[in-house]
Amino acid sequence: MSTLLEVSGVSVSFDGFKAINNLSFRIGQAEMRAVIGPNGAGKTTFMDIVTGKTRPDEGRVLWGERSLSLLGLSEAQIARAGIGRKFQKPTVFEDQSVHENLLMALQGPRGPWSVLFYRPNAAHLARVGELAAEIGLGDHLPRKAGELSHGQKQWLEIGMLLAQDPRLLLVDEPAAGMTPEEREHTTAILVEAAKTRAVVVVEHDMEFVRRLNCKVTVLHEGAVLAEGSLDHVTADKRVIDVYLGR
Amino acid sequence: MRNSFVARHPSVLAFLALLALFTLGVSVLSEGFGIGLISTSFVKTLGKTLCLCLIAVAMDLIWGYCGILSLGHFAFFGLGGYMIGMWLMYERTRLIVEGSLAQGALPPTEQEVVDAIGTQIFGVVGSSDFPLVWAFADSLILQLAMVVLAPGLLALVFGWLAFRSRVTGVYLSILTQAMTLALALYLFQNDSGLRGNNGLSGLQNLPGVEAPQAVISLWFFWASALALGLGYLLAAWIVSGKFGSVIRGIRDNEARVRFLGYSVETYKLAVFTLTACIAGIAGALYYPQAGIVNPAEIAPIASIYLAVWVAIGGRGRLYGAVIGAAFVSLVSSWFTGGQIPDLVLGPLTIKWVDWWTIVLGLSFVLVTLFAPSGIGGLFDLWQGRRPPDRHGADLGPDAGALREREATE
């Protein structure tokens, strides 16, 4: 399978603390990957680097068939290149309706001029309705996002991520604060998405990771400690020592 | 399209209808065309108030919707005034100079006329040469274009530098304030080319127009009302669509907007520049009614007042900004006009001219603390719309959801 994202030899330090230390990571076009690791292992910093929020001190981040370097691009350019991100804490626009939130995320031209004259057409409205139904918010389109429950906000954010139609989804703890049924639905959506695109899930919850049934990368102290199936990595002595054994 | 837009936003229609009614009412009661119940000077005050409402709409767009507390928009307002003032002053002086030179034996050469105009305009600052900035002053069309271009260009350059380096929040506010202060200090200099602290004066006279002030004041009043109506419509249209959605998103969480693929800096720059242009137009209509524009007009305090109006009126809603600007500036001119008798409280005598700023400051603090949606918030009460009570911590996962800890066990 050809590579979609390749991170190689990346290091970054904050005030002398090495948050990421010579990290290498690659993911294919249509692949699901779970990233686990104890607190401070560098999971969030890794996402920050890929999405352009943090500039690494050294290393390469290459994207797509033409191996475009992401390091010189702004966050917005990276997002337009096809990388979507879901934050750990649900960050939706609380002052705006579910409909507006989804419409803003919907794939389309992002320049001020075209956005100014943008009026949603039938296809776009249908897509918003479809997404809302998929995330269980079909009846809540006119409601303000701020009124939604925590779990519904998580859903809305997943919906916004899907609306962007990215080639790579970076998902930070998607199931935090969800009921078992909601978790199952989240799993189904992510597994479905991974059939056509790359999905990276950062998760603490081992049970959730097991259900994703995918290759697992274990981070520790800013570097990859182990990689392989969940059974393979959980059998690894070092992984047990630093993470699971606690 | 237009019909459906107005239908979806009835408040716009209501506003425009009220504005038209108000304009008609004032015209009927004016000295110029009506029964003379409203004095010409009060027509000018009302016309100027409409211009202040227009810049308040611009301020609401940049602050209330885009979340950028600009404390420098009066610089653009003043620049607009200077641009139109240059033509008014040049043209009026030219007519006077030509009239007096025509008395001479020989018809004056073009150079003589220009020199005489220069001496008339710049005599007060001990000069007679036209500085470079007056290059277009003889052309009304070009100078009208400058009304939009000069503030727009300044905003574009300033905004590009500021937003590109991701200056946000209070630091950006301080930066905008420094900009307006720097511009004011520059214009205060005699060799700035705009007559130093004298400013441009006599702007209430339209060159070549014989009509009395009572009529001219109404023309400007109508023009101000038209500009406010169009500006309001434009602003309402901008914030109603996806663009409005994006800039409100920038206000609430700009990092999130970036990760959606929108170039936040470009949007900020677009709104900043557009509002600067609107402010320039408002200024160009204001100063001919005031009669004089000088550097004191763009002192930082003016822009702070602008923020106070919008806050008291209610930000994030366009009619709130208009109400705030109209209400506060009219009440302010009433208090500072010296018409209200002093209040004697034992040994303390309250002179309203001096105490007004304290009243204004206090009401600003009270509105910020107890009624963040300002006067415009009264409309919500009237329509029975209430924001949810959001006291205390975030609700977090709802009762049916497991918390992270339970789920992993």
Image (cartoon, grey):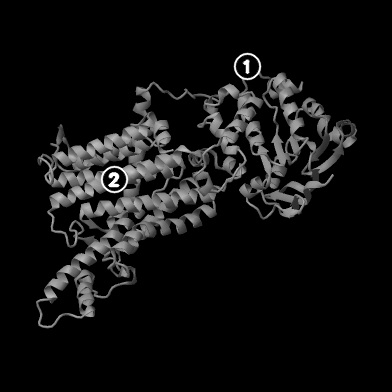
Judging from the image, what secondary structure is the residue with disc 1 in? loop
Q: Which residue is mark 2?
A: B226
State the separation of the CA atoms marked 2 and 1: 55 Å
Question: In the image, what residue type sits under mark 1?
Answer: Ala
- In the image shown, does A17 or A122 lie closer to the viewer? A122
Q: Which residue is mark 1?
A: B399
Q: Nearer the viewer, mark 2 or mark 1?
A: 2
Q: Is residue A98 left or right of residue B177?
A: right
Chain that bears disc 2:
B
Q: Earlier in the sequence, mark 2 or mark 1?
A: 2
Q: Is residue A218 visible?
A: yes
Q: Quadrant of residue B313?
A: top left
A20, above or below B347, in the image: below
- In the image shown, does A186 or A13 lie closer to the viewer? A186
Residue at left offset 34%, top offset 41%: B308
Q: Is residue B13 left or right of residue B158?
A: left
Question: In the image, what residue type sits under mark 2?
Answer: Leu
B198, above or below A68, in the image: below
Q: Quadrant of residue A72?
A: bottom right
